[in-house]
Image (cartoon, rainbow, N blue to C red):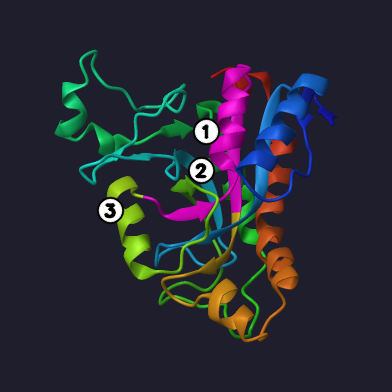
């Protein structure tokens, strides 16, 4: 779609790192968009980010690709993974043991688009759809409706319910929200020099009430319905961003 002479790419990739990377490459190669937005649902592992909330992906960690060494340690320095990320080692790799691994492979939504998202959120938030009054949609004290926040998003082809696994990715990477596409879309976009941003509507919170876990296994809820409900607010944010997008937001 073209808005104010800015070309925006929109496609449906399906779930997972491979699908989203293929779709992003095809989109950019075919249409040469000026920006790539990834919009969809994700799961929270932060007690402060609830279903219905909207997350702007400030930092995106691709945390699921690694090498386990013979001594049991994990080597994150795999060929190609460092591309346009914060992760780096010195030439002789001696700083591997000194904590660099904790930096992992972070990429970042483009600064201009993040600033635009924050501005648009101020206008979109008052119209966010409130939480449905039914099981699986927790409220937190002092909150009466969903909100938009920036957060660290983790990308992997996995959804975590095990508390011990959740603690590891929280402690090691600072991940607050997990999904299966953001880092792949971001790395493809960056390889073409195209600004990108990850926007997520929260569908479940595994540390409070696991909507996609226990409730779905018990056939208590319809996962498609939850996805539709949980992404309405993030699409409202996206629509507000489209109204406000400028060349400055793409180039800063």
Is tag 1's residue or tag 3's residue first in the polypeptide sequence?
Answer: 1
Question: Left of 246 or right of it: where is 161?
Answer: left
Q: Nearer the viewer, mark 2 or mark 3?
A: 3
Q: Quadrant of residue 54?
A: bottom right
User: Which class describes the residues within 10 Å of circle 2: few (<14), some (14-19), or many (20+)?
Assistant: many
Magenta residues (range) = 175-200
Q: Residue at x 67, y 46 (%)?
A: 39
Determine which residue is flagged by label 2: 57
Q: Nearer the viewer, mark 1 or mark 3?
A: 3
Q: Quadrant of residue 204?
A: bottom right
* Label 1 with label 2: CB-CB less than 8 Å: yes
Question: Could you tell me which secondary element the residue under label 2 belongs to?
Answer: strand
Is tag 2's residue or tag 3's residue first in the polypeptide sequence?
Answer: 2
Question: Left of 241 or right of it: where is 4?
Answer: right
Question: Could you tell me which secondary element the residue under label 3 belongs to?
Answer: helix
Q: Residue at x 28, y 53 (%)?
A: 171
Determine which residue is flagged by label 1: 109
Determine which residue is flagged by label 3: 171
Residue 102 visible from this viewpoint: yes
User: Which class describes the residues within 10 Å of circle 1: few (<14), some (14-19), or many (20+)?
Assistant: many
């Amino acid at each position: 779609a073209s808005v104010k002479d800015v070309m925006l790419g929109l496609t449906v990739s399906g779930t997972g790192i491979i699908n989203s990377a293929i779709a992003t490459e095809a989109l950019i190669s075919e249409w040469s968009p000026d920006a790539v937005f990834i919009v969809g649902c994700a799961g929270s592992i932060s007690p402060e980010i609830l279903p219905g909330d909207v997350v702007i992906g400030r930092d995106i960690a691709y945390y699921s690709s690694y090498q386990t060494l013979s001594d049991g340690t994990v080597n994150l320095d795999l060929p190609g993974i460092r591309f346009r990320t914060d992760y780096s080692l010195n030439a002789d790799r001696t700083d591997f043991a000194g904590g660099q691994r904790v930096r992992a492979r972070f990429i970042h939504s483009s600064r201009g688009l993040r600033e635009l998202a924050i501005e648009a959120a101020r206008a979109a938030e008052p119209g966010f759809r409130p939480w449905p009054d039914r099981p699986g949609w927790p409220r937190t004290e002092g909150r009466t409706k969903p909100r938009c926040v920036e957060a660290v998003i983790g990308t992997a082809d996995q959804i975590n319910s095990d508390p011990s696994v959740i603690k590891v990715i929280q402690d090691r990477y600072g991940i607050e929200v997990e999904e299966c596409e953001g880092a792949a879309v971001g790395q493809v976009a960056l390889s073409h020099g195209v600004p990108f941003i990850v926007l997520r509507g929260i569908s479940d919170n595994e540390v409070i009430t696991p909507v996609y876990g226990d409730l779905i296994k018990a056939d208590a809820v319809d996962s498609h319905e939850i996805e539709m409900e949980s992404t309405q607010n993030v699409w409202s944010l996206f629509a507000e961003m489209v109204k406000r997008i400028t060349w400055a937001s793409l180039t800063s």
